[in-house]
Image (cartoon, rainbow, N blue to C red):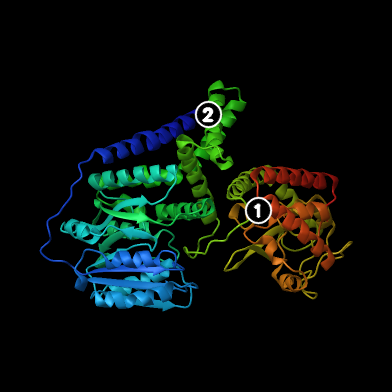
Amino acid sequence: MTTSWFILFILTLIIIYHHVIYSAVMVWYGRHLKRKITTVEPNSFPAVAIIIPAYNEEEHINDKLANLLMLDYPADKLFIFICCDGCSDETANICRQWESQFQRANIHFQLQISTSNKGKLARLNQLMTMAQPYADLVALSDVSALISIDALKQAIYSFNDPKVGAITGNYLIYNGNTGEQQYWSWQNNMRFAESHLGSVIGGNGAFYIMRTRLFQPLPNDTINDDFMLPMQVLKQGYNVIYNECINSIELDVSSNEENHQRRQRIGAGNLQQLIRCRFVFNLHQPGVKWLFASGKGLRTLMPFIFIVYLGLTLSLASEGSLLALWLTGLQLTGYGLAALPLIGIKNKFLDKLHYLIGGYLSSLIGMVRYIFGQFKHGWKSQPPIHHYQNTSTLILKRFFDIVLSCIGLLLTLPLWPFIALLIRLDSKGDIFYRQVRVGQINDEHIMLFSMLKFRTMLPNAEAESGAVWSRKNDPRITRIGRFLRDTRLDELPQFINVIKGDMSLIGPRPERPELCGCLQNALPFYLERTRGLRPGVTGLAQVNQGYDSCIEDVKSKIAWDHAYAVALASPLQWLRMDCCILLKTAYIMVTRRGQ
């Protein structure tokens, strides 16, 4: 118990240090630093290239190009490079229409149009290589962000210092919610303070500018390029500074679901960059080491710290500690208050708390996905799917998937060695059975994943027949396999698939790709079962019907699957439905009514 209390004490100090001491002091310091506005024209203007990878940006590309055309900078020193990365909308045509206006303004405008979508990072590396022979400085800016008219001139003033390698500025949101606006207000002040205390740690994709010669191509699996490029500058011995006179305004208003997905990606990128930026601790800059560890480092680890903290207080409370019980109640109250905006209860305090805790949750999910091998190809912008499911429901559903799967995995792990032994004694072959299944379907791709189960059939059971449905008294099923299927214990390894993000605990049953083509041809709306929805370990169709043995079974299952999807329109309706399915699943397992 003494060790547990000591760990709890240390974690309490870390949480207080990061949120109250470090963050609050940095925000206060950033607010009270004197702003310097430079208005003296420089003697000469270096060539500046602006590079923009674009994917389906027809909503904002007109505003962006007009913004670039109006920049207060010598036209003969300005170079614009845009790459349409497999755009399927009017982005490329709109860019062509603007070419003549840039030519009349004597601004070099180069448009690259690619029919394939390789992702932002691949195009960024490509455009950087194109821009290097033209310009001394290169600026990166998202299509959805407008920059202040004098942004480039302000950057030139800062680059008069030869130690400066990159510059970032204010990040403003045109129509963000209260929590989002407050968060970025704090971040801007913190970056201003970082700039004065050592160096800004990272940047943001809305706008940053760096010396062209310091660019090094990023690995293909880089997730947060707008952080890693400024960190490359830092690695080469230059400083990244914050210029408070440069403004970038984000126009794109993300839905809750899009914001949740974006913050998952950022969370995964934070973990990746924490690993890849270890070089910071080898720099001869104590201030930079402290800023990196106290800011980005602790922010990345904080979701894991919160989980350990809650687990420790629960454990100590179960042993009779009133203090631990009080701390547990305080945490649960905080998490409960943060969830209230999901059901429509809002005020400024709740919105800020929701944004903070929601950000940590999204970040945690993203980091878990990264640990389990997702984001291997970096990040590609994907078009939004207009879900009929409620966004709040999907966020809560994913949260409970992770929590319940982790609990289920821990509780059932003691059974795994016994199940493995029985499988091995019953028949030769592998303990686990891996099979490719069709997962979540999005606008541009169908996800395939390797589903993990305990083996219940003879080895190579489908070597001669190919993919076929199981049937009653199937001779391919082993003796222990029949027991595992009756009790659904063969599904236990799928907790791992759920944690990885391949599956959900509850949803439509994933089918094999070999059968999907025939089923889609025979049954209308078959593949739509998993559109925007992960397949499940159990589900409404599974508990009401069991395994498929013929196409008629599949036909009746489609109605169950779509009925479940409709239930996700309301958080309360979804919660009732999932509780009912879980209870029925437990009943089937206990009574051995599985197949």
Q: Is residue 334 above or below residue 60?
A: above
Q: Nearer the viewer, residue 414 or 38?
A: 38
Q: Number of labelled discs?
A: 2
Numbered mark located on residue 504 in the image: 1
Quarter of the C terminus within the rendering: bottom right
Quarter of the N terminus within the rendering: top right
Is residue 203 something one can see in this rendering?
no
Is residue 98 something one can see in this rendering?
yes
Disc 2 and disc 1: Cα gap in Å? 30 Å
Q: Is residue 584 above or below residue 135?
A: above
Question: What amino acid is found at the position of numbered circle 1 in the picture?
Answer: Ser
Q: Nearer the viewer, residue 428 or 295?
A: 295
Question: What amino acid is found at the position of numbered circle 2 in the picture?
Answer: Leu
Image x and y of residue 243, in percent? 24, 52
Residue depicted at x 74% and y 63%: 429
Chain-order first, disc 2 or disc 1: 2
Secondary structure beneath label 2 = helix
